[in-house]
Image: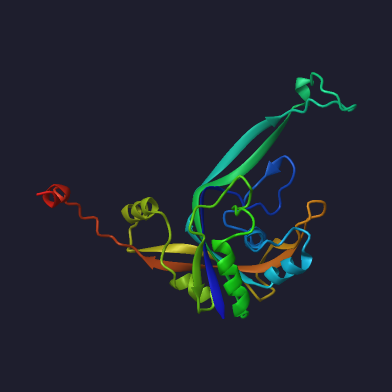
């Protein structure tokens, strides 16, 4: 079993699974369809390539939340100046409508995909370093910060997520250290599950065709990874001065 780890971080991310039209929501963690779409972009798999998409759907998928981020609402009013006949004209102000787009600001996630097909995993890892199409986190307006690929691990997916070091920003780690009453931090994980009694999420892509996007359900489970905090808050105010003498 080989597992590829991805660091998903950006000023803005958005991972919608249910919303359409005027209100575009986001989940609090990346969707499988969003990450599959990112991998498809890296490989150069186009929207109408159902066979290529089905191969990616076979990957086992999991997420660890490194940094929750903040929910951000982008509110807009939209008005069309095109009449029914197709000519530009003064539109009635009452024809304007409102749109709501939700994003996660300053969030960081550790995504993992795994497979027994070692050749496929190596192709995915190589493609992320030299993608065929631009990579983004949920929406095209959300380019990812580098690095995305953290490399392959010769581990099962759950074990890889449990053992990987914490990838939150330095600022977030310092904040959690100051606030922590204990010496550890718990990181939420959302993983593919096999049992039928698990929760279900409708984010497995069957088709990315803009005319008819189709998705199906997968079973998921939640668990937590525990990481040790560096609680040494000793501060030597003269350290910088002494280094210059």
Q: Residue furthest left?
A: 245
Is residue 147 or residue 167 the one in the foreground?
147
Where residue 19 appears, as percent x and y from the top left, is 71, 48
Asked whether residue 227 appears in the rendered view, the answer is yes
Question: Relative to 181, is 193 on the left or the right?
Answer: right
Query: Considering depth in this image, is 218 or 164 the residue closer to the camera?
Result: 164
**Residue 191 visible in the picture:** no
Residue 93 x %, y %: 75, 21
162, above or below 24, in the image: below
Q: How is the image coloured?
A: rainbow
How many labels sit on residues?
Answer: 0
Residue that lies at the very extreme toward the top in this rendered image: 90
Q: Quadrant of residue 41?
A: bottom right
Q: Give the percent coordinates (x, y) of residue 225.
A: 46, 68
Give 188 or 121, whichever is nearer the viewer: 121
Pinpoint residue 156: horizontal percent, then vertical percent.
Answer: 54, 78
Q: Quadrant of the N terminus?
A: bottom right
Residue at the spot 49% in from the left edge and 67% down from the top edge? 224
**Relative to 217, residue 101 above or below:** above
Q: Is residue 27 above or below residue 115?
A: above
Residue at position x 68%, y 30% in the image: 77
Q: Quadrant of residue 78?
A: top right
């Amino acid at each position: 079993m080989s597992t590829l780890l991805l660091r998903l971080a950006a000023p803005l991310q958005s991972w919608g699974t249910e919303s359409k039209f005027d209100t575009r929501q986001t989940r609090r963690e990346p969707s499988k369809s969003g990450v599959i779409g990112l991998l498809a972009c890296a490989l150069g798999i186009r929207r109408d390539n159902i066979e290529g998409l089905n191969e990616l759907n076979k990957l086992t998928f999991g997420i660890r939340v490194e940094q929750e981020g903040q929910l951000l609402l982008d509110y807009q009013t939209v008005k069309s100046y095109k009449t029914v006949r197709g000519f530009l004209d003064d539109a009635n102000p009452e024809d304007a409508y409102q749109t709501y787009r939700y994003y996660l600001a300053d969030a960081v996630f550790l995504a993992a995909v795994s497979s027994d097909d070692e050749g496929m995993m190596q192709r995915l890892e190589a493609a992320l370093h030299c993608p065929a199409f631009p990579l983004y986190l949920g929406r095209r307006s959300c380019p990812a910060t580098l690095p995305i690929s953290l490399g392959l691990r010769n581990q099962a997916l759950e074990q890889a997520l449990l053992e990987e070091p914490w990838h939150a920003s330095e600022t977030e780690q310092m904040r959690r250290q100051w606030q922590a009453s204990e010496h550890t931090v718990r990181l939420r994980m959302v993983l593919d599950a096999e049992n039928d009694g698990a929760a279900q999420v409708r984010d497995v892509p069957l088709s990315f065709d803009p005319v008819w996007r189709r998705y199906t359900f997968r079973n998921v489970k939640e668990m937590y990874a525990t990481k040790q905090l560096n609680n040494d808050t000793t501060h030597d105010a003269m350290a910088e001065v002494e280094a210059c003498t």
